[in-house]
Image (cartoon, helix red, strand yellow):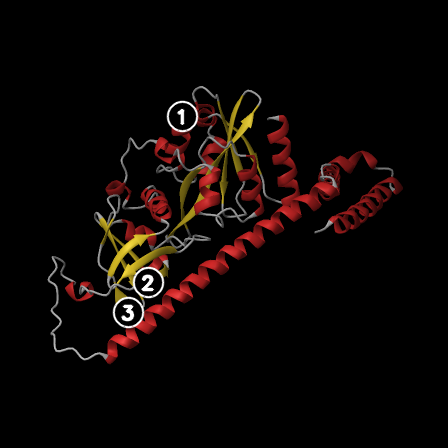
Amino acid sequence: MDTREYELRLKNLSDEILQIQTKYKKVKNESVLKFDSHYQDKIREKREILHFLSNLPNPKIIYTAVQEIDEKIKLKKKELDERNKLLQELRSKEKLLHSESKKKKSTKKVETKQTQYSFSKAFVYSDSSVTTALDIDWKNVHFQDGYIIIKAGNKWFDPFSVYESKKALNHIKAIYKFRNAPKLLIETSGRRITKIENIEVLHYYIKFLSFADTFDSSVLRNKNYSILKFKTYSKSFYKKYLPDLFLPACFDLLCKFSIEDLPIIPVPETVVNSSGNKQIHDSFLFPINNTDGILWIWESIEESKASYIFKSTKEEYETHLQLIFDYLTGDTVNKRFTLIHDKELANVLCFKKRVLHTYQYAWESATRSIIRHGL
C-alpha cells in the first residue's frame, strides 16, 4: 500500500467506528463498547495506521534513498554485464580452440590417468590448457570428507580439496533450498578446478549446514562450537559475498541498523511439517546498538514468523550470545513457544520481546521504535 491507500483505509475505519458507536448509542449501551472485539480491532488498526503515518520519513529523504538504491542497481547491472561479457569471451575462445584441435590429426594414444577413487571414469585427466569460467548450482556440489566434487552438465570435475567438507552434509543439503544464494563460481582447466572465485560463500554454507538440527548433527557438530567462528560475518561480508540474502524488507532494515564490527550470526532453523518431513530455514541474529547494551534480534526468512528480541551487555555479549545460539540450534521442540512460556528460560537468555509480522507497516514501526528508543 502507498500513503493514499493508508489514508483511504483510515477514513473507512473512522466511518466504521462511528457506525458502531452510533449503534450502541441508540440503545444507550455505550459502556459495552470496550467488550466488543470487532470494535476494538478497528480501534487498534486505526491507531497502528496513525502511528505508522506519523513516523513516515520526509519525502526528500525517501527520494534520496530511492536514488541511492537506483545507483546501486545500475552499478550491480554494470558488474553483471561485464561478467557476462567475460564469460562469453572465454566460451568463444574455448569453442574456437576445441574446433581447431579437432582438425589436427594425432597418432598419439590418450592414456587414462589412474586415480584412487572408485568413480575413476569421472576423473579422467585432461591436458587442456583452456581456462573456463562456470556458474555451478548447489545441487551439483557434492560434499565428501575433506574435499568436494562438482558436476556441470554430464561432466564431472576432479576433487577439489576443502578441509571443512564432510560427506554427511549432503543429507542436510537435500532439505535446504539455498534461497537467494549465489551460485558457486569456478574456473576450470580440462577436468581440473583451478579456482573457486567465491570460496568464502562455500565456507559460509559448510558452517551453516553443519549446525542444522538434523539426525546427522551428532556426526557434524562439536558441542563446544564457538560463535566466534562467525566473527567475520559482519554486514559488510553479507553485502560483498551474499548480496541477495537480505532482499526481504525486514532483513534489509535490520541489516541497515546492525553494528558494523559485530557479526550477524546465521542460525539454521530445522522445521518439521505434519508429515514428519524436515526443512531447514535461514534465520539470523542481528546485533543492534541499545542505550545500555546490545539487542540481538532473531529474524526468520519466513515472513509469517515473529521477531524475537534478546538483550546482552556490551562487555559480556560473547558469552550471552553463545547461550542464545546454543538454544536456537539445540534439540528443543517448538523453540518459540517454549521461549514465550518458560519464564526461567526467558530470564536466562534475556529474552525481552516479540514483534509480530501481522502487518509490515506495524512491524516496521514497532521495530524502528525499539531501535531508536530501546525496549
Residue labelled with disc 1: 318
- Which residue type carries mark 2? Thr
> Whole-Å distance between the Cαs marked 1 and 2?
43 Å
**Is 241 on the left or on the right of 165, as rendered?**
right
Q: Vertically, is 272 above or below 330?
A: below
* Image quadrant assignment for residue 133: bottom left
Q: Residues within 10 Å of mark 1 (few under 14, many from 20)?
A: some
Q: Earlier in the sequence, mark 1 or mark 3?
A: 3
Q: Vertically, is 265 above or below 182?
A: above
Which mark, by number, is residue 132? 2
- Which residue type carries mark 1? Glu
User: Of 194 and 270, which appears nearest the observer?
Assistant: 194
**Is 158 on the left or on the right of 275, as rendered?**
left
Mark 1 or 3: in front is 3
Q: Could you tell me if the residues under marks 3 and 2 are in contact, i.e. CB atoms within 8 Å?
A: no
Position of residue 369 measured from the top left corner of the image (x, y, whole percent): 64, 32
> Whole-Å distance between the Cαs marked 3 and 2?
16 Å
Mark 1 or 2: in front is 2
